Image: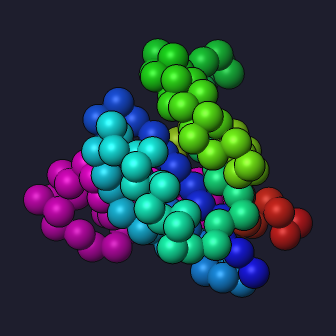
């Protein structure tokens, strides 16, 4: 089966997670500079069979778009141009960064390791993807 890929797109960094081939387990893939995201994905899609991409949709607590929404919408538009055939789903990403940070604490990472914002972004993408897989199975 092909993989599903999740993107936690940010102004500076983008966390990327991917499923295994059976679409059961989400794993962090990497964190990249956001300006390289399309080039990275072109290379990745050439090597791996990906059927769907999830892109986080940032929302405020009241459900309104966050201040980073215009940046992410621009990326989504660029993505659709670069990959017109790829299935794309937008998913609510509220709390994923907070959950990622808590995951780092719970797993015993030292304070210096928890300051790695790239790791937070990668874990956030993994949480986003695992949540999607869990909802899909219900």
Give the quadrant of residue 79.
top right
List x then y, in percent, for residue 58: 56, 30
Q: How is the image coloured?
A: rainbow
- In the displayed image of the protein, which residue is found farthest to the right? 138
List x then y, in percent, for residue 127: 55, 59
List x then y, in percent, for residue 11: 35, 30
Give the quadrant of residue 97.
top left
| Location of the C terminus (image quadrant) | bottom right
Give the quadrant of residue 114.
bottom left
List x then y, in percent, for residue 86: 71, 51
Vertical placement of residue 72 versus 119, above or below: above
Residue 103 shows in this picture: no
Q: Foreground residue, 75 or 100?
A: 75
Q: Is residue 15 left or right of residue 136?
A: left
What range is drawn magenta here?
104-131
Residue 81 shows in this picture: yes
């Amino acid at each position: 089966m092909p993989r599903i890929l999740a993107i936690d797109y940010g102004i500076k960094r983008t966390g990327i997670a991917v499923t295994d081939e059976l679409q059961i387990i989400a794993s962090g893939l990497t964190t990249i500079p956001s300006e390289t995201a399309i080039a990275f994905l072109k290379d990745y899609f050439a090597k791996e069979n990906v059927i769907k991409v999830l892109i986080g949709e940032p929302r405020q607590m009241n459900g309104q778009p966050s201040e980073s929404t215009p940046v992410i919408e621009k990326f989504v538009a660029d993505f659709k141009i670069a990959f017109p055939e790829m299935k794309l789903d937008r998913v609510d990403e509220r709390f994923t960064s907070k959950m990622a940070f808590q995951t780092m604490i719970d797993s015993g990472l030292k304070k210096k390791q928890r300051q790695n914002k790239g790791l937070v972004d990668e874990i956030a993408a993994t949480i986003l993807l695992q949540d999607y897989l869990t909802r899909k199975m219900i």
